[in-house]
Image (cartoon, helix red, strand yellow):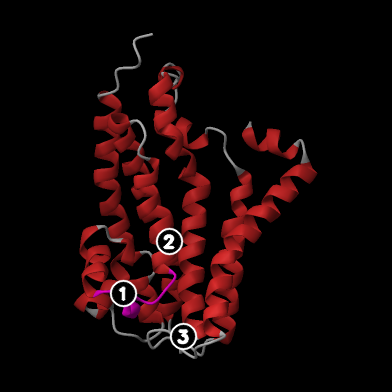
Amino acid sequence: MWVRSTMAYRFSFAMTLFANFATTALDFVVILLMFSHVRGLGGFSFGEVAFLYGTSCTSFGLADLAMGQVSRLGRRVRDGTLDLLLLRPAPVLAQVAADKFALRRLGRTAQGLIVLVWSLVVLDVEWSPAKVWLLPSMVLTGALIFGAVMVVGAAFQFWTQDGAEVVNAFTYGGNTLLGYPPSIFAQDLVRGVVYGVPLAFVNWVPALYVLDREPPAGLPGWAAFCAPLVAGVCWLPAGLAWRVGLRSYRSTGS
């Protein structure tokens, strides 16, 4: 329904899609400006940083397209309109994710994918069947990990009613973090996104294997293939948090 509504005004959709594409591209412009003054960043070349940025941005774009609307849950909890979704014979999480579905968010995904393809052209990677499999795998599993974090953040709003900015620190902030090599960050922060909130499995861990780099935070080399398992594990607490939060919902009383 929301896609049909959006496509009813095709020129408006094209302009908002371009605006989304251009706005997100500014993040990569920052990297371009940085490399106009330096030859490397934390021991990584421009192509390698572009590869990290492209994989992270594409994964986050897919997650944001599918689950980005769940950040609006706090508003529905505050005004009691979540009651309408509870009355419908469809999963509440699916309804919240589809609410005001914004097709313009494809701009972020397209921009990240363009950078990713360009980085693959300029990089000199010795491809193997394992590396070829890792490339699409890290993009899809990265989207699942970001999606799980978004669902946990949505569940958090059942109690706080307005915690979107806290969640953004892990989603938008995590996307920005993963666009740069782990060698430029403090080791405590790197360990936090490896063993705490495992955002490093979005792209750092598998991408460093593709680039023939040492994995972060002392992980073994085979950890690069554990990203799908990590994504599945992330959705277990996400699903539990959502169920607990939904059951604690008491409406507004009006």
Question: Is residue 219 visible in this depiction of the protein?
Answer: no
Q: Please report contact status of discs 1 and 2: CB closer than 8 Å, yes or no.
A: no
Look at the numbered disc 2 and give the secondary structure of its residue: helix
Q: Predominant secondary structure in magenta?
A: loop
Of 235 and 175, the residue lying toward us? 175
| Mark 2 to mark 3 CA distance (whole Å) | 26 Å
Q: Residue at x 30, y 32 (%)?
A: 160
Q: Where is residue 158 in the image (x, y as percent from the top left)?
A: 31, 30
* Amino acid residing under circle 1: Phe
> What residue sits right under mark 2 in the picture?
175
Alpha-carbon neighbours of circle 3 within 10 Å: few (<14), some, or many (≥20)?
few
Reading the image, the residue beneath label 1 is 185
User: Could you tell me the amino acid type at mark 2?
Assistant: Asn
Residue range highlighted in magenta: 179-186
CB atoms at circles 2 and 3 under 8 Å apart? no
The secondary element bearing badge 1 is classed as: loop
Give the number of the mark in front: 1 or 2.
1
Which quadrant would residue 133 be assigned to in this image? bottom left
Q: Please tell me which residue is depicted at 30% across the width and 22% down the height of the picture.
A: 249
Q: Earlier in the sequence, mark 1 or mark 2?
A: 2
Q: Residue 42, image x and y in percent?
A: 37, 84
Mark 3 / mark 1, whichever is N-terminal: 3
Question: Which corner quadrant holds the C terminus?
Answer: top left
The secondary element bearing badge 3 is classed as loop
